Image: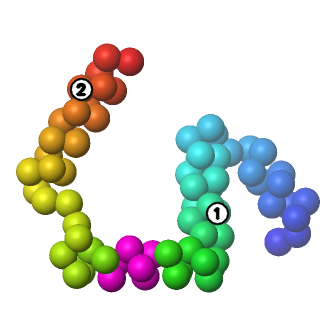
Amino acid sequence: MSITELKATAANLTPRERAWLRAYLFAEERAADPAWKTKIAARRKRLQSGHGVSDTTCAKRLTRRSSIAKTK
């Protein structure tokens, strides 16, 4: 498929489909980035060594975030 055909296909997508395509392409690009892979590996190592967020802290953050979202 050529770039012209891809553009034409993208132009005919619904807003929801375009949003999905945008997120998909962003994730694909990021997943191929060596710097991103290094950053994620470091985060994973830190979490596995016990520096994560406790269940209680996570629940508080989610509760606070959902109450903020409701007020908007």
Q: Quadrant of the N terminus?
A: bottom right
Dominant secondary structure (helix, strand or loop) of the stretch shown in magenta: helix
- Quarter-wise, where is residue 2 in the image? bottom right
Q: Residue at x 90, y 60 (%)?
A: 4
Please tell me how crowded label 2 is: few (under 14), some (14-19), or many (20+) other residues with Cα within 10 Å: few
The residue where tag 2 is placed is 67
Q: Residue at x 59, y 46 (%)?
A: 19
Residue 31 in sight = no
Range drawn in magenta: 40-45
Give x and y (percent) for residue 72: 38, 18
The residue where tag 1 is placed is 25
Magenta stretch holds residue 44: yes
Work out whether residue 51 or residue 31 is closer to the camera in this orientation and state it: 51
| Distance from the alpha carbon under mark 2 to that under mark 1 | 31 Å
Please tell me how crowded label 1 is: few (under 14), some (14-19), or many (20+) other residues with Cα within 10 Å: few
Residue 20 in sight = yes
